Amino acid sequence: MITRNIIVSQIADFHSTETKNVRGLVTLNGEGNIAGVMRVFNVPNDILPVTLAIKIGDKKYVYDNITDTQNYEFKIVNAPICDNITILLAYATNGYVQGVACGHNAGSNDSFADLFDEISDTELDAVIDKEMDKNDLQTLADTPIEEPVENLPEDEPNFVENTKNFYSLIQPQLDELFEKFPHFRELEDLVQNTEWVKVSYSQDGSQHYILGKLFDGGVVTHLCYGIPAQSRSTTPPASLTDYCQWLPLNLNDPDSAGYWVMYQNAETGENIKM
């Protein structure tokens, strides 16, 4: 079974009523008929329910009236086999649609504009405003609504020190990535008490992002997500601009190649300025 993990993070111009940034993970399992689960944290209660929009290749899928953003399960039927996947979480009030968080399996969050337009479309506005019944939504999305998902991986955190926190909720998906992809030894040697992997998303392995864990006495304290850049002068993705930090691969030449990295508190999922 193929597993894809898409990190979603708060859209820069979304002004949350909470002090914590909205972020989380969407996991897709399978090909063709895809089982999915969304875990997004720090979504303000006053904007619920929200809408989840997914684009796989050229096909779009929309799920609305989501109130449980930390454990929302869904199923996509007859999805195309494609590595180009975009996620958008949005909400509507009085006909006005605002994006909350987005993500892309390539690490670039600048490809959700058409999904935003899709949600803003008159018919889908009606869906968000509960003026369209679920049979019509099923026709638009070409997928069952709220269909029970079978054979989803169970959350069974085995890291005792971190149970019932943000890390424990996404640990099964992270463990799969750390087992599947090669460790980034160069970065592990550079940053003590860490583990890193390169997650490739192109067939030849030339395109990738990095995942990392920071430890303190064997306990995971921070999670890290990094996008490669040729130099420090390379502009980071817009969705990372407000909270990413530069991590060079060569400390003697800090402006040369490296990564734009964001850090999360493993306990709360909150972005941390390191």
Image: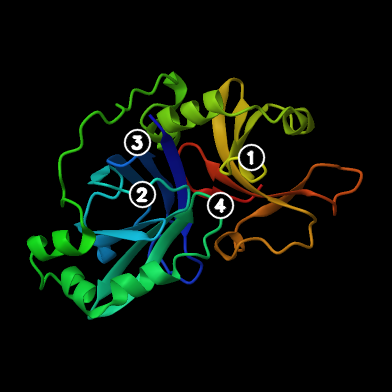
In the rendered structure, which amino acid carries the disc numbered 1? Asp
Look at mark 2 in the image and give the residue it sits on: 80
Residue under the point 31% across and 42% down: 32
Say what secondary structure mark 4 lies in: loop
- Foreground pick, 31 / 119: 31
Q: Secondary structure at mark 2?
A: loop
Residue 44 in sight in this render: no
Q: Amino acid at mark 3?
A: Gly
Q: Estimate the x, y position of residue 84 in percent, counting from the top left.
A: 47, 52
Looking at the picture, does residue 150 appear above or below residue 16?
A: above
Q: Kindly report which numbered mark, 3 or 1, lies closer to the viewer in this rendering.
A: 1
Label 2 and label 4: CA atoms lie apart by 20 Å
Establish if 45 lies above or below 182.
below
As measured in the structure, the alpha-carbon distance from the residue carrying label 4 to the one carrying label 1 is: 17 Å
Residues tagged 1 and 2 counted as in contact (Cβ below 8 A):
no
Res. 204 mark: 1
Question: Residue 47, located in which quarter of the rendered image?
Answer: bottom left
Q: Earlier in the sequence, mark 4 or mark 1?
A: 4
Residue at coordinates 24% horizontally, 49% vertically from top-left? Answer: 68
The residue wearing badge 3 is 30
Q: Which residue is mark 4?
A: 107
Per the model, the C-alpha gap separating discs 3 and 1 is 21 Å
